Amino acid sequence: MACLLEAPLRISVLSEVTATSRHYVDRLFDPDPQKVLQGVIDMKNAVIGNNKQKANLIVLGAVPRLLYLLQQSSSSLQLRTECAVVLGSLAMGTENNIKSLVDCHIIPTLLQGLLCPDLVFTEACLRCLRTVFISPVTPVQLLYTDPTVIPHLMSLLSNSQRTQEYITQIFSHCCKTPEHQTVLFNHGAIQNIAPLLISPSYKVRMQALKCFSVLAYENTQVSMTLVNVLVDGEQLTQVFVKMMQRDQPVEMQLTAAKCLTYMCRAGAIRTDDGSIVLKTLPCLVRMCSKEHLLEERVEGAETLAYLMEPDVELQRIASTTDHLVAMLADYFKYPSSVSAIADIKRLDHDLKHAHELRQAAFKLYASLGSNDEDIRKKPILESGVIELLCSLTQSDSPALRVNGIWALMNMAFQADQKVKVEIVRCLGTEQLFRLLSDPDTNVLMKTLGLLRNLLSTRPHIDQIMSSHGKQIMQAVTLILEAEHSIEVKEQTLCILANIADGNTAKELIMTNDDMLQKIKYYMGHSNVKLQLAATFCVSNLIWNEEDGSQDRQDKLREMGFVDVLHKLTQSADPNLSDRAKTALQQYLA
């Protein structure tokens, strides 16, 4: 019998909660203003930390009534302020709560409320606006709809530390596009926010710093202006440098490093400037170490990758700083084993960030290995990273396969023979050819890029083709015969052109009549990119100054290649006609 009572019991509890919530909403309509005020205060106490109560009140229509009371000039200032406080508390619930508030037009109502001269009321409105705007479900464009809003917010900055904290937080969350950066810049964001970097309040300093990081990102105009800003007689860059000191909170160090990174990438600070080489770079490397939280390590690694991506010298310094390459290998060891983590929440957190951590490490490897051979030679070979990346190419996840291959491709670019041999050895020919038939086009393209980088410079081409030539030629044949995109076929023909540049490797093409016919076919293809790549291949095969060139020229003439080259000299594409003329000159020399 007890079982039968459970369902009705549950319903009665629910109706009790709803009845209580209904009581709170009903009191908002009382004709006595004092009772309305007390009702709002009681509602405020009831919703603190109670998401269920918040959801009930929203469903029962509390929000439109609170917004109505907040707007009425007949409402007392205390009532209007308490309404803003309750709305702020409702906004701290779930994302659905925020959506309901936005649908009730809370943003324009609160922005209108900021015109009131009372400080306590405007602070309550700003606190609620801040909570609404930092939610991912709020459309940030709502801040820019009315052109008078941004200048008014700027004018409120000097009112109190609270207004400074809330307004800068709203700006940093709502600055998402170059257009947003321009609006804020044009309304004096830099001169209004710069003094806040030396505020006695940590929260204000931190939010002001975040504002500068989003304003400076990929923005030359902002970055060039920031370099010349003085804060209390000190250059802004030096203020950022001080904020990166080890005795500052990690969040502040990281954000200050981001500001200087973005200014450097925008061309406002030289890459060899002391603030970058001696301060920003070491700070970001420090952030990659395992003593930091996972999300801090992700942010540190991504920012470091962005900072040094175009600069060989910064890559060289980073690769030899604090065992960075070895530290990155740890990024692939997350999450820790389940048995080692007693706390389920911690495990959930680790799993969530593990993917981001790996992605950040890939970005850093790609940056480290993109320009400088010396970097690849020693630290990367010694760290066991190549084995790690090769094992990731066997992952079930296409994203991990792509990233593993992408990092290997960058490592192979202009690398010495030792690194290339190690990549081929670790990857193994079977896995390499499995990747060349991968159903994911991104994986295929990156694998072709890796192969192209491995087959560059003659001694490397000859050595790799002498041990793996048969399988490579087989893979090239399969790709050229199959249904693939122009990009895939172009990359494959470029690999063939590299093979044709080898001293002994070119014989693998010359003794394969089927392959020669394919090259001839692509010389006459309707796509210029494929014609160019195929013609380049022919040039390399018949180049005059090389042993056996006469025999190769004779064979290709017999196969009709010279006739095709003559036709291509008449091509409307200047690159293609030039390349065809260069090839024909080999016959005349």
Image (cartoon, helix red, strand yellow):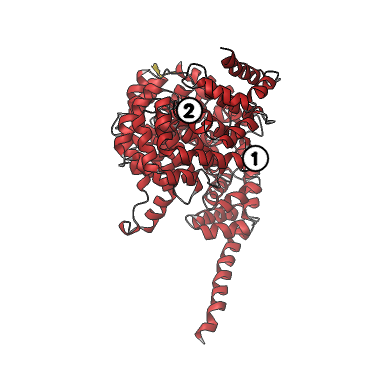
x 35%, y 33%: residue: 419
The residue nearer to you, when weighing 310 against 278, is 310
Q: Is residue 366 toward the left or the right of residue 57 in the image?
A: left
Badge 2 crowding class, 10 Å Cα cut-off, few under 14, some 14 to 19, many 20 or more, is many
Q: Does 144 sit above or below residue 334?
A: above
Residue occupying the far bottom of the picture: 1
Q: Quadrant of the C terminus?
A: top right
The residue nearer to you, when weighing 552 against 489, is 552
Q: Position of residue 151 (x, y in %)?
A: 59, 27
Q: Earlier in the sequence, mark 1 or mark 2?
A: 1
Q: Mark 1 points at which residue?
A: 108
Mark 1 residue type: Pro
Q: Is residue 219 toward the left or the right of residue 332 in the image?
A: right
Residue occupying the far top of the picture: 589
Q: Residues under labels 1 and 2: Cα distance?
A: 26 Å
Mark 1 lies on a secondary structure that is: helix
Q: Name the residue under label 2.
A: 212
Q: Does 334 sit above or below residue 525?
A: below
